Image: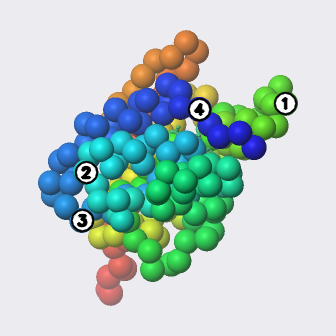
């Protein structure tokens, strides 16, 4: 399976990292960074260039070719469908995901579908990610997630969201969101 070549979506995520990581590292020099669906590792290199410690940079992909490639670059990368192969006790300060977000299209070649197609409405992979990701964030942890105007039915329930950046492309608009889990308030006794 071929590895996703960085495109406009990747470059928007890079810009977000360049704008936000320096301040986050200042607040937490031991910041633990995870990218789900790392592809060719473009954001791992950005994280390293922006001085996140290499031992604190983690990544994964469902595509074994991408995993082997990122490992060959010296990055910590595991083969996993979202968080399936992560240990429960692993916690991260920042999780980023530039997901497959397009609705199913029979014309899309099989080889590239894994990187681009996020289920019938485009949101199935994203919604599974959102359900799982909050279990892997540390106390002040947050997520940077990229979405598109083509993606329908995203369920942000359980998160507070803030738009970091949007970009108009030919027929779509892509956005990067900052997401923080909303604290669960325990029921009070009458
Ligand atoms: C749009 S590409 C982004 C690649 C890279 N992060 C970038 O920004 O250029 C989506 C990536 O997510 C991976 N992916 C798709 N479904 C996944 C899943 N369920 N679990 C982990 N990775 C997945 C794909 O293999 C692909 O590398």
Q: Is mark 4 within 8 Å of ligand 1?
A: yes
| Residue at the image position 36 percent from the left and 42 percent from the top | 46
The mark closer to the camera, 3 or 2, is: 2
Q: Is residue 162 above or below residue 137?
A: above
Residue visible at 51% across and 17% down? 169
Give the distance between the C-alpha atoms of the residues marked 2 and 4, in whole angstroms: 24 Å
> Which residue of the protein is positioned furthest toward the bottom in this rendering?
189
On-image quarter of the C terminus: bottom left
Residue at mark 4 to residue at mark 3: CA–CA distance:
30 Å
Distance between the alpha carbons at the discs numbered 1 and 2: 42 Å
Residue under pointer 4:
5
Callout 3: SS: loop
Residue linked to disc 3: 30
Marks 1 and 2: CB-CB under 8 Å?
no
Residue occupying image coordinates x 62% and y 37%: 4
Q: Please report the residue visible at 58 percent of the width from the left and 63 percent of the height from the top.
A: 78
Q: For the residues marked 3 and 2, what is the alpha-carbon distance in whole angstroms?
A: 10 Å
Mark 3 and mark 1 in contact (Cβ < 8 Å)? Answer: no
Residue highlighted by disc 2: 51
Give the mark, 4 or 1, whose residue is nearer the N terminus: 4
Which of disc 3 and disc 1 is earlier in sequence?
A: 3
Q: Tag on residue 15?
A: none
* Residue 31 rendering spot, x and y as whole percentages: 27, 61
């Amino acid at each position: 399976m071929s590895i996703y070549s960085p495109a406009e979506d990747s470059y928007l995520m890079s810009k977000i990292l360049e704008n936000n990581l320096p301040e986050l590292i200042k607040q937490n020099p031991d910041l633990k960074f995870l990218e789900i669906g790392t592809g060719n590792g473009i954001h791992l290199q950005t994280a390293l260039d922006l001085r996140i410690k290499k031992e604190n940079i983690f990544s994964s992909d469902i595509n074994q070719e991408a995993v082997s490639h990122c490992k060959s670059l010296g990055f910590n990368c595991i083969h996993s469908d979202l968080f399936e192969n992560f240990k429960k006790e692993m916690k991260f300060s920042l999780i980023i995901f530039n997901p497959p977000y397009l609705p199913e299209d029979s014309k899309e070649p099989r080889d590239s579908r894994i990187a681009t197609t996020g289920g019938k409405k485009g949101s199935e992979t994203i919604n599974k990610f959102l359900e799982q990701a909050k279990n892997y964030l540390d106390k002040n942890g947050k997520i940077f997630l990229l979405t598109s105007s083509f993606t329908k039915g995203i369920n942000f329930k359980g998160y507070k969201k803030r738009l970091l950046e949007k970009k108009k492309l030919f027929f779509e608009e892509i956005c990067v969101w900052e997401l923080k889990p909303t604290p669960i308030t325990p029921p009070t006794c009458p």
